[in-house]
Amino acid sequence: MKNLFLLPLAFASTFGLANSQAYLITEFQVSNNLVTFKTQPQKATNTPSCVDENNKDSWAISLNDHGSNNLYSLLLGAFDSQTPVYLTSTEQCIPESGIEKLATVSVN
């Protein structure tokens, strides 16, 4: 009976990731409190209009934001081990950077 309760959760998790793109982090940089990274393959989603043309394959987080240290740790680990990640955008840019701001990261 316990397994029947977990079945919808497993289905929802699998269905949610089925529509997502897995990315490998190819470059990783930290400058002051800004973490930027590039991914492959090309983003599967439309980028916000605030993204500069030469930053379309880049993502960013500000280490000043609440919870960003957790994102930083997870991203760095994924970069180091070349583990694919699933990324979700805030649909905004880091102010004055022209780089898309990361909302969530998950590893399958």
Image: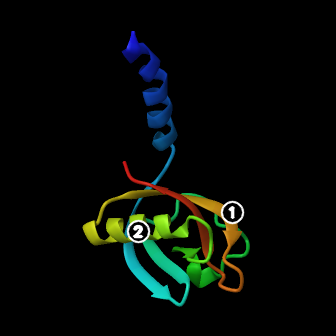
Q: Residue furthest left?
A: 81
Residue 30 visible at all: yes
**Residue 94 picture quarter:** bottom right
Residue 40 visible at all: no
Q: Report the front residue among 13 and 65.
A: 65
Residue hosting label 2: 73
Mark 2 or 1 closer to N-term? 2
What x and y, as percent, mark residue 59? 54, 72
Q: Amino acid at mark 1?
A: Glu
**Structural crowding at the residue carrying mark 2, measured as other residues with C-alpha within 10 Å and reported as few (<14), some (14–19) or many (≥20):** few
**100 versus 14 height, above or below:** below
The numbered dot on residue 91 is 1
Q: Amino acid at mark 2?
A: Ser
How many numbered tags mark residues here? 2
The CA span between labels 2 and 1 is 22 Å
**Structural crowding at the residue carrying mark 1, measured as other residues with C-alpha within 10 Å and reported as few (<14), some (14–19) or many (≥20):** some
Q: Report the front residue among 3 and 40.
A: 3
What x and y, as percent, mark residue 46? 63, 61
Left or right of residue 76: residue 36: right
Q: Report the front residue among 81 and 19.
A: 81
